[in-house]
Amino acid sequence: MTKVYPDVAQLAPDDMKLLCDTFRRNNEIDVETSERLGVKRGLRNPDGTGVLAGLTNICDVIGYERKEDGTIVPSEGKLIYRGIDLQDLIHEAIEKDRFLFEEVAWLLLFGDLPDREELLRFSKILEAHRELPEGFAEKMIMDAPSPNIMNKMARSVLAMYSYDENAEDTSLENIIRQSVNLVAELPTMMIYAYATKLHVYDHKSLYFHYPMEGLSTAEHILSIYRPDQKFTHEEAKLLDLCMVVHADHGGGNCSTFANRVLSSSGTDTYSAISAAISCLKGPKHGGANLQVMNQLDFLLENISNPDDDSEVLAMLEKMLRKEAYDRSGLIYGIGHAVYTISDPRAQILKEHSHELAVKKGFEKEWNMLVSIDRLAPLAFQNVKNSSKQVCANMDLYSGLIYRMLGISRELYTPLFAIARCPGWCAHRMEETEFANRIIRPAYKYVGTSQEYISLDDR
């Protein structure tokens, strides 16, 4: 990749080795010590469930039931937005052939379903605020390009602070205004950041399409992303579906919790949402769908007969034993912190992506994902010798959908961020308005005691 700017100052190899060795020698904390002191690493209970850190009215993620004796029993996964089952929302979108992201954004932000007039008004408000402030694209995006779009989106959200006369106002009215603006503007920020990246780093032609009237958020994204601005209704509906299932996932997921931690401190909206984007950027969180697609390409290249379950299973077992693919011991797209038997989001994306996969010639890829979905739990049992149930998560299918839509893999995680923005903003509103206490867990010091020795005597 072309270097646009010179590297920041680098340390000499010997200096770097000295610093790293010193840090590791003085900071190692072993797992045994953590368990002995009752530390809930990763804010997880010993049974793998999350530590209860707060209450919310926004979203419920259900993957197990807890019995009276404290043990957990796996259950079919459910995702509930403001008391409404995600499956019911998807049914409405499919049966009535409707774009639903705007309605879900209203639902998450304000707590109830909009009537026809409210939905139309809200959609028009979003449409009116998709264009970025005057000079923003040139000064904040083009003048400081980034090879990573998530990084540029996080910086762009932070930069919006400079364009807001009431950036520090944490009243509910002002946070709602800022939230609506961010939900509307983030897709435009993403596409403009990507176009700039293509121009500066990949030496391709630069073009910005202005937002068009009368489009849903999904249609708007495809319109300003594609050079000819053309897309089919079917394509836009599938992207809308992806956005609906990504819109929220409770207060405990990594990016939403980071957003709530920052919001609890009383900081501004742009700082809190930028932190959530930065958190989602990590491959252990939002970046997993990109890993799934790299894994899919590897499997199709290294399995001679994708229809042979025994061959696919053998490769998955090798991956778990760190003998194949990236030797991480992971099968990307499999397993979840809450869902055990099924992830409702994965089931929705699986069901509604098949038709387009056949139509666009991606049936081989889709079939391989279904095989992973079906065989990975058996691979875990064989290799890990564990009775713990694992299931496919949403990342297993979302990346292929984006590929079928012709969307660059560099935008897979940014699209996740755009879809999650209403949920983040809803949790920020709830934390700021009702929690009123800074989040402050404890860390126990386990380092050694030492006396200060004068520099001359060391």
Image (cartoon, rainbow, N blue to C red):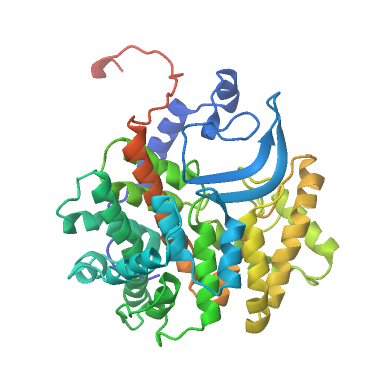
Between 304 and 93, which is closer to the camera in this rendering? 93
Q: Who's the residue at 44% across and 86% down the image? A: 230
Is residue 225 shown above or below 159?
below
Q: Pick the quarter of the image with the N terminus.
A: bottom left
Q: Residue at x 80, y 58 (%)?
A: 313
**Vertical order, 145 against 450 (above or below):** below
Q: Quadrant of residue 245?
A: bottom right
Q: Is residue 132 above or below residue 265?
A: below
Residue 259, quarter of picture: top left
Residue 217 appearing in the image: yes
Residue at (49, 41) in percent of width and height: 252
Q: Looking at the image, which residue is at 79% across and 39% down?
A: 387
Question: Where residue 417 sits in the image (x, y, percent)?
Answer: 43, 58
| Location of residue 72 (image quadrant) | top right
- Rendered location of residue 402, percent (x, y): 54, 71
Question: Closer to the camera, 276 or 83?
Answer: 83
